Image: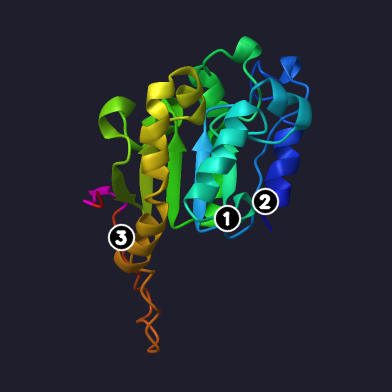
Amino acid sequence: MDDLKTVAAEVRGCKLCGLAPTRKNAVPGEGPDHAEIMLIGEGPGFNEDAQGRPFVGASGQFLTELIASAGFKRTEVFIANVVKCRPPGNRDPLPDEIMACQGYLDRQIALINPKIIITLGRFSMARWFPNERISVIHGRAKQVDGRIVVAMYHPAAALHQPALRQTLEDDFKRMQSILADAQKKVAPPAPKKPAMPERGSKEEEKSGDAEQLSLF
């Protein structure tokens, strides 16, 4: 049976791409098994590589403050990255590295089944908002496969560009209303009918096409 501990163990022993030989520690992610909110960054940095935990450096401290400003505790959300090992010199993750880690991230999303996914930075954003620019769509949300995805700046961007700090703080302060909206707008799977289906019949799956939401 698949679970988050199994995924984490596989990540720590992973050798699917060229990042494995240069890492100190893989960083699977951390948080409760059934968190309503999942935050997905780009990749581990120096401190994360040293400790094997996500967002523990300067940008991680800022992220913890942002989560608190939104009325949540860090222990209430699940935090992960698009790639699970540190790219050398904190360079951008390469496409083949992102693809190598995609299966792990897919399994984490499926197991946690969050109501909201918050993407942090352009590499995380690209999966759900392809060909978009973070400067244009930050704070924008859309519904995908029964959950809401919100694009936000990476906390590190605000540390490098102080002018973005207020923007990021304002976007995070909407998390409470986003969650409340998600609980109302994202319909749970339809309950099974008590009657037995006809032999040979098959339920049709709902389309996973993204539906744009006007939350803001």
Residue 205 visible here: no
Query: What kind of element bears circle 1?
Result: helix
Q: Work out whether 32 lies above or below 166.
A: below
Range of residues picked out in magenta: 208-214
Residue placed furthest toward the bottom? 195
- Residue 133 vs residue 112: left or right? left
Of circles 1 and 3, the one toward us is 1
Please give left or right for residue 65 compared with residue 134 in the image: right
The residue drawn where x is 65% and y is 35% is 54
Q: Is residue 91 above or below residue 75?
A: above
Which mark's residue is nearer the viewer, 3 or 2?
A: 2
Residue 92 lies in magenta, yes or no? no
Q: Where's residue 22, x and y in %?
A: 73, 14
Q: Secondary structure at mark 3?
A: loop
Q: Which residue is mark 2?
A: 4
Q: Quadrant of residue 65?
A: top right
> In this figure, which residue is indicated by the disc labeled 1?
111
Q: CA distance from mark 1 to mark 2?
A: 7 Å
N-terminal of the pair, mark 1 or mark 2, is 2
161 vs 143: above or below:
above
Q: Where is residue 127 shown, x and y percent of the image?
A: 39, 34
Crowding near the residue tagged with mark 2, few <14, some 14–19, many ≥20 C-alpha atoms within 10 Å: many
Tell me if residue 138 comes above or below residue 19 in the rendering. below
Of the residues under marks 1 and 3, which one precedes in the sequence?
1
Seen from this angle, which residue lies furthest top? 89
